[in-house]
Image (tube, helix red, strand yellow):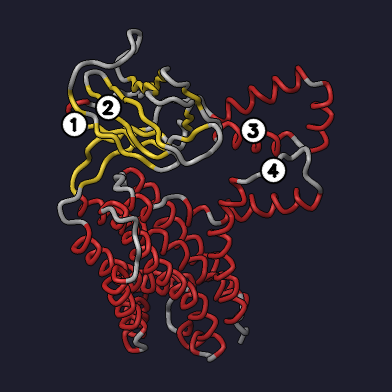
Amino acid sequence: MKAFASIVRLELVAAVRSKMLAALTGAAVLWMFVLPRFLRDDGTAEGAFELHVRYSLGVVFALVVVSLAAAAAGTLSRDRDAMRLQLTLVRPVRRFAVALGRIVALTAVGAFVLGVAAAILQIREGAGKTCDHAVAPVVSDPAAEAERLYAEYEKNFPDFKEQAAEVGKADIIKYLKQYVCDQFQSVAAGETAEWRFEPPPDASAGLAVRVRLADMFGRLDRVSGEFSYGDLHGDLSHITRTLARVDLERGEPQESPDAKAGTLVFRNGGKATVSVNPRRDLHLLVAAGGYGANVFRAWLELVCILAAVVSMSAFFGSALGRSVATFAAMAYLFASVVGPSVIEDRPDPVTMTRMERFTMGVADFSSALTSPMNSCAPVSALESRECVEWREVARVAGLNVLLFPLVFSLLAGLAMSVKQPRS
């Protein structure tokens, strides 16, 4: 334990002496204060707030992740090439402790820089603001719906079974799950739609609806209507395809006669049919508390993501040369950004060529490999003032802080034992 603490301390001292910590902190502070002067928003306070959060803390996080991923990829490989790593291993210290100590130190550097940026964000943008729990409506399980559709197609279309055997059921189920998640529910002019929430959110906590509506032609047009939840209701008058927030206030019950407790009702008061994707674009918002505590929880998640990236990059540095390890770390970050968009636009597997199937297989593999980077979106939550839940923080920390550094430090130790010259 003493040797491990010494490795962490020496790496932190190296970060200070090399001015890496000062450079990252200075760049973060400068960006956080300079950015608002150059951004052009939509003229509303809410639009300006969203842009400032997205492009201030988001860019600082990207800078920290890229810089420390490159540093982690180079630290072990550089010391091995300079014969400093062999001198370290002469001491009574295990190889995995060397890797873990450097992972912890570099993560601590990033945590400090992100903490400074988060504090500035709270001071500049968070004063007087609150956050909300986002509660999704009860909808059918996409996997169960995909299985049902698969069985239905198999029964009604004779050629489908033969095509499925050639393509593979797993790929078709993935496509059908995406199809189910992308389904819209239409509400004609003058009609109502209902969505059930379980358990029913407490109406006394202060409720609002967050929704994005579209018309059947995908045009930008104004939509009007009314939401009601028990004796709470709110009027909607907004442009389609944009995210709207409707505060619900106490008044005369506006729900349909057969609506039940915990049911949100929307009446389309416009002249055209509108659609909503209840799985993605409809949430009931429940007041959750102050914005400062939410910034702190988001900072914890950002540090957790950083720990996973630094861990994998350190493993690359232990197994590969410095330039190759840095390239591998950057490729990993690139895949984490591009992979989700490729998966979301999954084409019909029946019509795909072999090359397209191979490409989707690579995308699925990279998506699974980069899942620690994409398992949460704390900056997006801060931007929309959505509460970062403690249970989500605990889940991300368990995977990215407890599991990943330990696993990749053990793998790095094994790689170092293979790469080291035997005496």
| Quadrant in the picture for residue 422 | bottom right
Q: Above or below — where is 269 with respect to 168?
A: above
**Amino acid at dot 2:** Pro
Residue reaching furthest top? 257
- Residue highlighted by disc 2: 201
Image position, residue 288 (x, y; %): 22, 40
Helix, strand or loop for disc 3: helix
- Residue highlighted by disc 4: 347
User: Which residue shows up at 20% across the image and 16% down it?
Assistant: 252
**Amino acid at dot 4:** Pro
Q: Name which of mark 3 and mark 1 comes first in the sequence.
A: 3
Give how far apart the Cα atoms at labels 4 and 1 are: 43 Å
Q: Name which of mark 4 and mark 1 comes first in the sequence.
A: 1
Give how far apart the Cα atoms at labels 4 and 2 are: 38 Å
Q: Please state which of the two labelled residues, at mark 3 or mark 4, is closer to the viewer.
A: 4
Helix, strand or loop for disc 2: loop
Marks 1 and 2 close (CB-CB < 8 Å): yes
Residue reaching furthest front? 271
Marks 3 and 4 close (CB-CB < 8 Å): no
Image position, residue 50 (x, y; %): 33, 55
Marks 4 and 1 close (CB-CB < 8 Å): no
- Residue highlighted by disc 1: 205
Categorize mark 1 by other alpha carbons within 10 Å: few (<14), some (14-19), many (20+).
few
Give how far apart the Cα atoms at labels 3 and 1 are: 38 Å
Image position, residue 268 (x, y; %): 39, 23
Between residues 178 and 93, which one lies in front from this camera angle? 178
Q: Name which of mark 2 and mark 3 comes first in the sequence.
A: 3
Give how far apart the Cα atoms at labels 3 and 4 are: 10 Å
Give left or right: position of 145 versus 401.
right
- Residue highlighted by disc 3: 176
